[in-house]
Image (cartoon, rainbow, N blue to C red):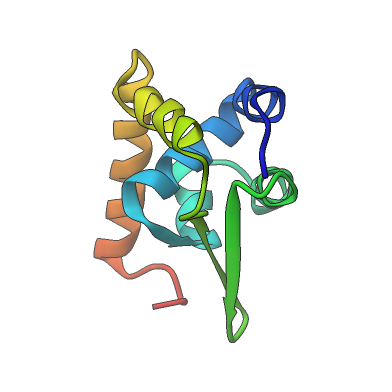
Amino acid sequence: MVTEDDLFSLLSHDTRRRLLLLLEAFGELCVCDLVAGVDLPQAVVSRHLAALRAAELVVARKRGTWVYYRRRADLAPWAKDVIAALRAGPGSDVLARDARRVEVLRAEARCESR
C-alpha cells in the first residue's frame, strides 16, 4: 500500500498528478485518452503510468491491444482525501483543460479503443 512519502513524491510531478486527476475525474481511461488529455507523447505518459502502477495508485486492464487505467478503489481514505483535495485545488483549471481534451477526443471518436 502507498505511504505518505510515496504519494507526495509521485504527486510532486505535474504529469503524474494530472494523469491521476484525470483518472479520478473519469473513472477509467484508455492510454489514448490520457495521451490526449495531458497532450504529451505516449512514451512519456506510459512511463508515468508505470510509476503510478508500481506505487499501487492505479490498476490496469488490457482489452485487445488497448490498456485501460483507473485509480485503485481500495486506496487508504487519507490518500483518497488528498486526491480529492487536489481536484478542487488551485490547479483545477489545468484539470478542466485536460478533461476538455479527453472529451473532444471521445466526441470525435478519434481513439480506436472505442
Q: List x then y, in percent, for residue 94.
A: 37, 26
Name the residue furthest top. Answer: 90
Q: Nearer the viewer, residue 5 or 13?
A: 5
Name the foreground residue: 106 vs 89.
89
Q: Farthest bottom residue?
A: 64
Q: Image check: 102 left or right of 17?
A: left
When asked about the image quadrant of residue 65, the answer is: bottom right
State the count of labels.
0
Residue 14 in the image: state x and y as whole percent. Answer: 57, 25
Q: Residue at x 35, y 51 (%)?
A: 102
* Residue 11 higher or lower than 16, as above or below: above
The residue under the point 45% across, 26% down is 82
Q: Residue 100 in the image: x percent, y percent?
A: 28, 43
When the figure is inspected, residue 85 is found, relative to residue 100, above or below; the finding is above
Locate the N terminus by quadrant. top right
Q: Is residue 33 above or below residue 84?
A: below
Q: Quadrant of residue 52?
A: top right
34 or 40, nearer to the observer: 34
Q: Is residue 8 above or below residue 16?
A: above
- At x 29%, y 33%, the residue is 96
- Which residue is situated farthest in the front direction here? 77
Residue furthest to the left: 107
Q: Quadrant of the C terminus?
A: bottom left
**In the image, residue 105 lies at what x, y percent?**
35, 58
